[in-house]
Image (cartoon, rainbow, N blue to C red):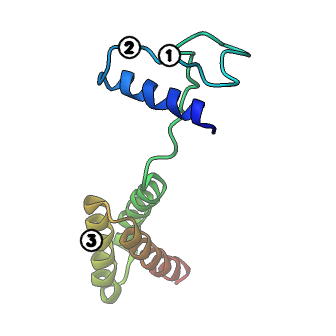
Amino acid sequence: MNARNATWHVERLQHLWNETDAEPEIEPEGEGEGIGAGDEFAEMPALVPGPREGQREAVQGRALLEKAERLLEKVPAEDRAEVERLMERVRTALTDRQWDKLTTASNELADILFYLEDA
């Protein structure tokens, strides 16, 4: 960027921030040509939102809790307390939106459910 462009950009920013009422006097080099030239506010591209933070983890955690609740009746008494403890850890991590803890708790609950399904 040369000094002429820099001056124009500074003046433009000052105008946008209402520090001055004057439009920039010098148009930067290379501008004013091409598609949408002259339009002060050309149409901006639409921003597409990315995946919400923790959405995948939350869905997996809820599904795992539903599965654990269905299997809880069939769980032997000696393992039931452990399953309930792990279910509570998943619920707490979901409520607190602690995605790393939710992943860890979900993995532990999934492991014990896998073991209990095969038994």
For image coordinates 52% across by 26% down, the residue present is 8
Which residue has dot 2 on it? 22
- Label 1 crowding class (10 Å Cα cut-off): few <14, some 14-19, many 20+? few
CA gap between label 2 and label 3 equals 63 Å
Q: Give the amino acid type for the residue marked by disc 1 in the picture.
A: Glu
- Secondary element at tag 1: loop
Label 3 Cα crowd, 10 Å radius (few <14 / some 14-19 / many 20+): some
Q: Quadrant of residue 32?
A: top right
Residue 20 vertical position relative to residue 52 in the rendered view, above or below? above
Describe the element under mark 2 as helix, strand or loop: loop
Residue at mark 1: 25
Task: Work out whether 49 lies above or below 109.
Answer: above
Task: Give the amino acid type for the residue marked by disc 3 in the picture.
Answer: Glu
Give the vertical position of 57 relative to 101 (above or below).
above
Q: Is residue 5 above or below residue 94?
A: above
Residue at the image point whose x is 44% and y is 26% from the top: 11
Dot in front, 2 or 3: 2
Q: Which residue lies at the image location 43% right of the left edge and 14% below the top edge?
A: 23
Label ID, residue 88: 3
Asked whether 92 or 11 is in front, the reply is 11
Mark 1–mark 2 distance (CA, rounded to whole Å): 8 Å
Amino acid type indicated by mark 2: Ala
Q: Nearer the viewer, residue 7 or 109?
A: 7
